[in-house]
Amino acid sequence: MTRSQQIFLGLALGFALFLGFQLGLAVSDQWIVIILIALGCGFITRFVLQWFFKRKNHG
C-alpha cells in the first residue's frame, strides 16, 4: 500500500468512525451499542477500501 493510500485510508476511517458514532447516537442511548455501531462502520470501511486498493493495484 502506497503512502497516499495509507493517508486516504486513515482519513476515511476517521470519517467513518465519526459517522458511525453519530449514527449510534441517533439509534440508541446505550454506550456499548454506540461504540459497536461506530466500530462496525470503521471495519466495513477498512475492508472495502483495502479490497478496492488491492483490486486497483492488480488491475
Image (tube, helix red, strand yellow):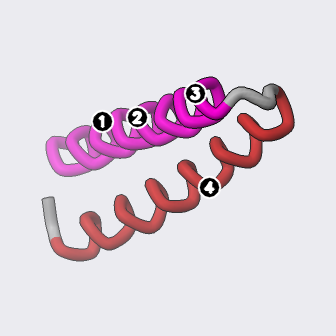
Mark 1 or mark 3, which is nearer to you?
A: 3
Q: Main secondary structure of the magenta part?
A: helix
Residue 32 is tagged as 3
- Give the quarter of the image for residue 47: top left
Secondary structure found at label 1: helix
Secondary structure found at label 3: helix
Q: What is the spatial separation of the Cα atoms under label 1 and label 4, in whole angstroms?
A: 22 Å
Residue 51 is tagged as 1
Q: What is the spatial separation of the Cα atoms under label 1 and label 3, in whole angstroms?
A: 28 Å
Check if residue 39 falls in the magenta segment. Answer: yes
Mark toward the start of the polypeptide (2 vs 4): 4
Q: Which residues are magenta?
A: 31-59
- Give the quarter of the image for residue 25: top right
Where does the image place residue 4, in percent across and percent down from the top left?
Answer: 27, 75
Where does the image place residue 18, in percent across and percent down from the top left?
Answer: 62, 55
Query: Is 30 drawn above or below residue 14 in the view shown?
Result: above
Q: Is residue 11 left or right of residue 3?
A: right
Identify residue for label 4.
18
User: What residue is shown at x 14% (from left), y 59% (from top)?
Assistant: 1
Q: Nearer the viewer, residue 31 or 39?
A: 31
- How many discs mark residues in the rendered view? 4
Amino acid at dot 2: Phe
Secondary structure found at label 4: helix
Q: What is the spatial separation of the Cα atoms under label 2 and label 3, in whole angstroms?
A: 16 Å
Quadrant occupied by the C terminus: top left
Q: What is the spatial separation of the Cα atoms under label 4 and label 3, in whole angstroms?
A: 15 Å
Query: Is 18 drawn above or below residue 32 in the view shown?
Result: below
Secondary structure found at label 2: helix
Identify residue for label 2.
43
